[in-house]
């Protein structure tokens, strides 16, 4: 929750609680890092650790692209979420998609940006050639792409395949039902607790294990 606070309120929380360490599950701004440094608080940068090649986020992106290839899509694209901007998890998932394309001898993936606004998303989805498999940053991004495809008359999964990430409730509410990637949050929490107990001074590498994740097959691929 700290990662979503403004720098001023973030500083107030750090000053009040005086934590020994902060576990960063999403990217921290430089302003927040400066607050932590000045307070002598150690940062365990989990987001960066799981975003390295072979890490959880990178592997999820590669898994999305490989699934789309297996379903017969010969063009692969990646949908960024504009709200994520240049988030480390977005970059890692996109790089995983790129690596899968490279390994399969396919062209670099086309990259579109989804804004969760119909006026912008219609043009972005319309730019994808028929027969494209679209790997999306998360389920919200994928749901927006599905909605845009329906408006412009692009049939799913025949002309466009779409796969999300996170296995959120929205994945069960789209039409057609979304294919997504799920992962074991409880297992990840258990591993995090074990590492912290077993290693008084853990490094980012101690958290880089990919963990368990799986494909939930919907009707969008």
Image (cartoon, helix red, strand yellow):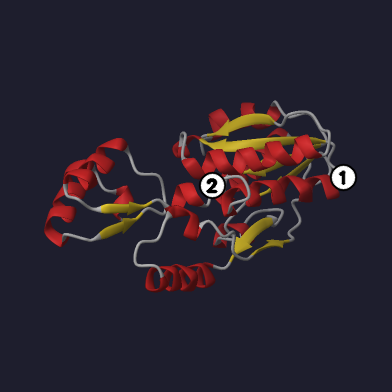
Q: Earlier in the sequence, mark 1 or mark 2?
A: 2
Q: Is residue 28 something that shows in the picture? A: yes
**Callouts 1 and 2 close, C-beta under 8 Å:** no
Q: Position of residue 183 (x, y in %)?
A: 59, 64
Q: Which residue is mark 1?
A: 72
Which residue is rendered at x = 76% and y = 35% of the image?
102
Q: Which residue is mark 2?
A: 51
Q: What residue is rendered at 40% in x and 68% in y?
A: 199
x, y percentage for residue 27? 40, 44
Give the x, y percent position of residue 85. 46, 34
Locate residue 179: give its quadrant.
bottom right
Is residue 186 left or right of 133 when viewed as pictured?
A: left
Residue farthest toward the right in the current orientation of the protein: 72
Give the class, few, some or many, for how many residues have Cα within 10 Å of label 2's Cα (few <14, many ≥20). many
Between the residue at mark 1 and the residue at mark 2, the CA separation in whole angstroms equals 27 Å
Q: Is residue 98 above or below residue 9?
A: above
Position of the N terminus, as image quadrant, is bottom left
Is label 1 in a helix, a strand or a loop? loop
């Amino acid at each position: 929750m700290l990662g979503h606070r403004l720098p001023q309120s973030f500083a107030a929380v750090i000053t009040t609680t005086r934590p020994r360490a902060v576990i960063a599950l999403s990217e921290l701004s430089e302003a927040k890092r400066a607050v932590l440094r000045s307070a002598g608080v150690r940062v365990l940068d989990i987001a960066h650790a799981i975003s390295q090649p072979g890490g959880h986020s990178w592997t999820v992106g590669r898994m999305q692209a490989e699934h789309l290839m297996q379903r017969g899509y010969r063009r692969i694209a990646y949908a960024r979420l504009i709200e994520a901007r240049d988030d480390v998890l977005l970059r890692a998932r996109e790089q995983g998609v790129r690596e899968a394309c490279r390994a399969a001898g396919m062209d670099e993936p086309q990259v579109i940006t989804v804004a969760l606004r119909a006026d912008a998303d219609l043009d972005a989805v319309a730019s994808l050639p028929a027969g494209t498999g679209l790997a999306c940053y998360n389920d919200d991004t994928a749901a927006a792409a599905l909605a845009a495809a329906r408006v412009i008359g692009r049939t799913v999964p025949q002309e466009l395949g779409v796969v999300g990430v996170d296995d959120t409730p929205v994945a069960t509410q789209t039409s057609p039902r979304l294919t997504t990637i799920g992962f074991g949050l409880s297992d990840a929490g258990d591993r995090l607790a074990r590492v912290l107990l077993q290693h008084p001074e853990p490094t980012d590498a101690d958290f880089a294990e990919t963990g368990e994740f799986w494909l939930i097959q919907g009707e969008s691929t």
